[in-house]
Amino acid sequence: MLSTGFKLPQKGILVGIQHSFRPKFLAAAHQLNKEGFKLYATEGTSAWLTANDVPAIPVAWPNQDSPGSAASLPSISRLITDGDIDLVVNLPNNNTMFIKDNFLIRRMAIDHGVPLITNFQVVNLFAEAIKHSGKLDATSLFHYRQQDTSQQG
């Protein structure tokens, strides 16, 4: 992912996950929390994460972001615009009631250059890989091969 310009999140991760993915996502959520990421989540996801010992800050759905709205929750659009969220995990399914809101979240991420993960397997692989991210080495494969041949010769 890094080779495509993907940047590891430094500030916060917005999580929006439909019910069918939640039980399988719990291990990834614990791993992201363990690695020190601040998790923001839509109201239902935040309540579920918190109930499962993963702290998450609840945020308002995009349709609750209107200027006249008295929503007391932080606005997703404001958090993305201000740079407080630098990764969006949005896992809707065919049974979601929030089709428009999920679209708006994904659109905001793309419009602001925020990395977006919409695939369940990729989220799990990302959470697994993130624990090894401190060991990242920017050496290219070419240099590894050069080192290998010089040690053999």
Image: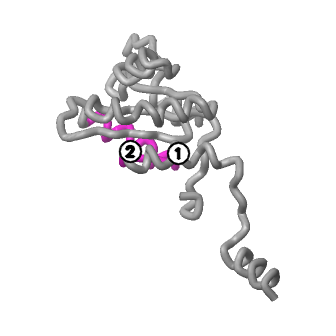
Helix, strand or loop under label 1:
helix
Q: Nearer the viewer, mark 1 or mark 2?
A: 1
**Which numbered circle lies on residue 107?**
2
Find the residue positioned furthest to the left.
Answer: 95
* Residue that protrudes farthest toward the front in the picture: 152
- Mark 2 nearby-residue class (10 Å; few <14, some 14–19, many ≥20): some
Q: Which residues are magenta?
A: 100-119
Q: Which residue is mark 1?
A: 128
Few, some or many residues within 10 Å of mark 1 (<14, 14–19, 20+): some
Above or below 113: residue 76: above
What residue lies at 52% left-to-right and 49% top-to-bottom?
Answer: 113
> Does dot 2 land on a helix, a strand or a loop?
helix
Q: Amino acid at mark 1?
A: Glu
The reply, left or right, for residue 124 in relation to residue 148 is left
Q: Earlier in the sequence, mark 1 or mark 2?
A: 2
Percent position of residue 2, x then y: 58, 58
Q: Residue at the location (72% across, 60% down)?
A: 137
Tell me the tag on residue 96: none
Residue type for callout 2: Arg
Alpha carbons under labels 1 and 2: distance apart: 26 Å
Count the marks.
2
Q: Position of residue 11 (x, y in %)?
A: 62, 34
As rendered, which of 69 and 117 lies closer to the eye? Answer: 117
Image height of 66 relative to 138, above or below: above
Image position, residue 140 (x, y; %)? 69, 71
Depth order, front residue of 64/67: 64
